[in-house]
Image (cartoon, rainbow, N blue to C red):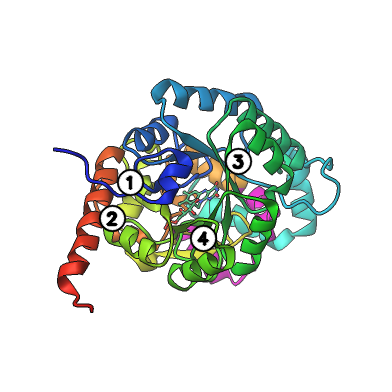
C-alpha cells in the first residue's frame, strides 16, 4: 500500500518525507545510532544528543549513523551559556577534588547523598571520570566536527548559537534552536536559526514552565515567517495533528521514542515510561540542579521529603555522580535519572521506531481527515 502523504514546508527544508523529528536526547543510551537511523529511514528526521561527547567520539557516531542510512539526520548539543569571552574554557575537575570541596562547602548535602547510598543498600562506587562541563571550548570542537562531517541539521538547546550560524550556513547545515518562552525565541531569531523548536513544560528532560498549548501559537507569532516545530507531550497522531493546528510545521518527540525497541535505555527505565501515568513524571532539580521533568523515583521523592534545596547546576550533578554510579553498578537502574515527559501516560508498548513513525503518520492523517467529517463549517 502506498505511504500516506503528510507534508509541510519543514519537509522541504530538511529534505524529509514526514515532519516528525526524533528529539536529540543526551547520552548514547537515549538516542543510539540505530534509533536515529531508523527514524530517518522511516521518513522522519533522526537526531542524536551529543552533549559531553569527546569530538572524536562524536565523529564516530556521525559516521555510524551514515553507515546505517543515507537519509538526513541531525545532532543536538546543549550549548554552554556564553557570558564573556568565547575562548573561556570549561572546568574539568578530578572527582576527588570535587568530593572534598562539596563535603567542605555543602556538608548537609554531601551527608544526605551518602545516607541515600546506605539507605538503598548500594555498595558505594566512586565515579572516576572527571566532572564538570567542557564549556565553550568543547562546544567549539564539537561544532567543528559536526560541520566538517556536513551533518544536515544541528539543534542547539540552551545557549546562543549566533557564533556558529555563519559557519553552519557555509557548510550547508540547517540550524534549529530550542526555546521554552517568547524571550528566548527572539534570541534564536537574532542568532539566525532556520527553525525554532517550541518546547512545552510537558516535555521530558530540562524544561520550562509554559505548556505546549499556549506556547506554540505564541512562538509561531513571535518568529514568523520562521517555521516552528512543536515539542512536549506529543506521542500520538492526534498530538501531531494538534501541533499542526497550533501553527507548527512539525513535531519533535523525545519520550515516545524512549519506548522504541532500538532505544538502549535500561529496561526498568523503559518500564517506568510504559507503565507510568502522566502525573508520575515531575519537575525536579534533584539529579542535575536544573529543572528537569523525570520519573518520580524513590531518589526524587527522598529529595522532596528531605526539604533540602538541590545545589545549582553543575554542582548537583557532581554531588549525585557517585550515587548514580553506585546505582548503575548495582543494576538499580530504577534509582537513576530517568528524564521523560507527561506523554508517558499515552504509551504502553515498546515497538520498532518504524512502527511508531507509521502510527504517528497514519493517525495524524486520519484525525485531520476526520475533522472534516465531524465538524461542520461554512
Ligand atoms: C531522556 C531525555 C533526554 C533529553 N536530553 C536532551 C538533550 O540532551 N538536549 C536537548 O536539547 N533536549 C533534551 N531532551 C528534551 C528533548 O529534546 C525534547 O524537547 C523533549 O523530549 C520533547 O518532549 P517529549 O519528551 O514530551 O516528547 C531530553 C528529553 C528526554 C526525555
Q: CA distance from mark 1 to mark 4?
A: 22 Å
Magenta-highlighted residues: 297-320
* Secondary element at image label 2: loop
Q: Are marks 1 and 4 in contact (CB under 8 Å)?
A: no
Mark nearer the viewer, 2 or 4 = 4
Q: Is mark 2 within 8 Å of ligand 1?
A: no
Residue at 19%, 77% in the rendered image = 376
Q: Is mark 3 within 8 Å of ligand 1?
A: yes
Residue at 26%, 56% in the rendered image = 364
- Given the current orientation, which residue lies at the most extreme front position? 378
Mark nearer the viewer, 1 or 4 = 4
Taking depth in this image into account, of 291 and 368 the one nearest to the observer is: 368
Q: Earlier in the sequence, mark 3 or mark 4?
A: 3
Q: Does residue 194 appear left or right of residue 94 in this picture?
A: left
Q: Earlier in the sequence, mark 2 or mark 1?
A: 1
Q: Which residue is mark 1?
A: 259
Q: Which residue is mark 3?
A: 51
* Secondary element at image label 1: loop
Badge 3 density bin: few <14, some 14–19, many ≥20, Cα 10 Å:
many
Q: CA distance from mark 2 to mark 4?
A: 22 Å
Name the disc covering residue 198, or none. 4
Question: As displayed, is residue 15 above or below residue 349?
Answer: above
Q: Earlier in the sequence, mark 2 or mark 4?
A: 4
| Image position, residue 28 (x, y; %) | 49, 35
* Secondary element at image label 4: strand
Amino acid at each position: 500500500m502506498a505511504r500516506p502523504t503528510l507534508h509541510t514546508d519543514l519537509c522541504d527544508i530538511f529534505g524529509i518525507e514526514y515532519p516528525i523529528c526524533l528529539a536529540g536526547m543526551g547520552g548514547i543510551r537515549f538516542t543510539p545510532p540505530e534509533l536515529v537511523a531508523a527514524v530517518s529511514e522511516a521518513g522522519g528526521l533522526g537526531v542524536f544528543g551529543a552533549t559531553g561527547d569527546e569530538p572524536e567520539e562524536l565523529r564516530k557516531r556521525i559516521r555510524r549513523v551514515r553507515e546505517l542510512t543515507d537519509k538526513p539526520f541531525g545532532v543536538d548539543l546543549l550549548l554552554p551559556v556564553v557570558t564573556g569571552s568565547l575562548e573561556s574554557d570549561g572546568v574539568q575537575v578530578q572527582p576527588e577534588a570535587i568530593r572534598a570541596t562539596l563535603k567542605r562547602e555543602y556538608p548537609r548535602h554531601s551527608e544526605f547523598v551518602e545516607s541515600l547510598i546506605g539507605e538503598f543498600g548500594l555498595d558505594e562506587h566512586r565515579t572516576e571520570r572527571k566532572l564538570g562541563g567542557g564549556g565553550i571550548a568543547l562546544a567549539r570542537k564539537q561544532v567543528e566536527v559536526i560541520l566538517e562531517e556536513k551533518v544536515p541539521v544541528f539543534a542547539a538547546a540552551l545557549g546562543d548559537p549566533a557564533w556558529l550560524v555563519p559557519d553552519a550556513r557555509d557548510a550547508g547545515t540547517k540550524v534549529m534552536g530550542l526555546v521554552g518562552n517568547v524571550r528566548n525565541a527572539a534570541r534564536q531569531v537574532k542568532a539566525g536559526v532556520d527553525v525554532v523548536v517550541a518546547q512545552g513544560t510537558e516535555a521530558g528532560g530540562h524544561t520550562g514552565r509554559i505548556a505546549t498549548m499556549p506556547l506554540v501559537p505564541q512562538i509561531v507569532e513571535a518568529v514568523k515567517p520562521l517555521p516552528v516545530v512543536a515539542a512536549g507531550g506529543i506521542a500520538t497522531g492526534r498530538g501531531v495533528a494538534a501541533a499542526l493546528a497550533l501553527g507548527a510545521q512539525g513535531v519533535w518527540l523525545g519520550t515516545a521514542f524512549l519506548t522504541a525497541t532500538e532505544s538502549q535505555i535500561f529496561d526498568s527505565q523503559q518500564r517506568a515510561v510504559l507503565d507510568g501515568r502522566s502525573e508520575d513524571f515531575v519537575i525536579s532539580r534533584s539529579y542535575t540542579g536544573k529543572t528537569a521533568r523525570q520519573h518520580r523515583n524513590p531518589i526524587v521523592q527522598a529529595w522532596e521529603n528531605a526539604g533540602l534545596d538541590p545545589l545549582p547546576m553543575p554542582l548537583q550533578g557532581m554531588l549525585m555522580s557517585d550515587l548514580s554510579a553506585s546505582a548503575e553498578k548495582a543494576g538499580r537502574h530504577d534509582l537513576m535519572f530517568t528524564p521523560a515527559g507527561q506523554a508517558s501516560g499515552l504509551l504502553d508498548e515498546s515497538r520498532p521506531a518504524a512502527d511508531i513513525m507509521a502510527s504517528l503518520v497514519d493517525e495524524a492523517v486520519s484525525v485531520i481527515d476526520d475533522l472534516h467529517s465531524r465538524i461542520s463549517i461554512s
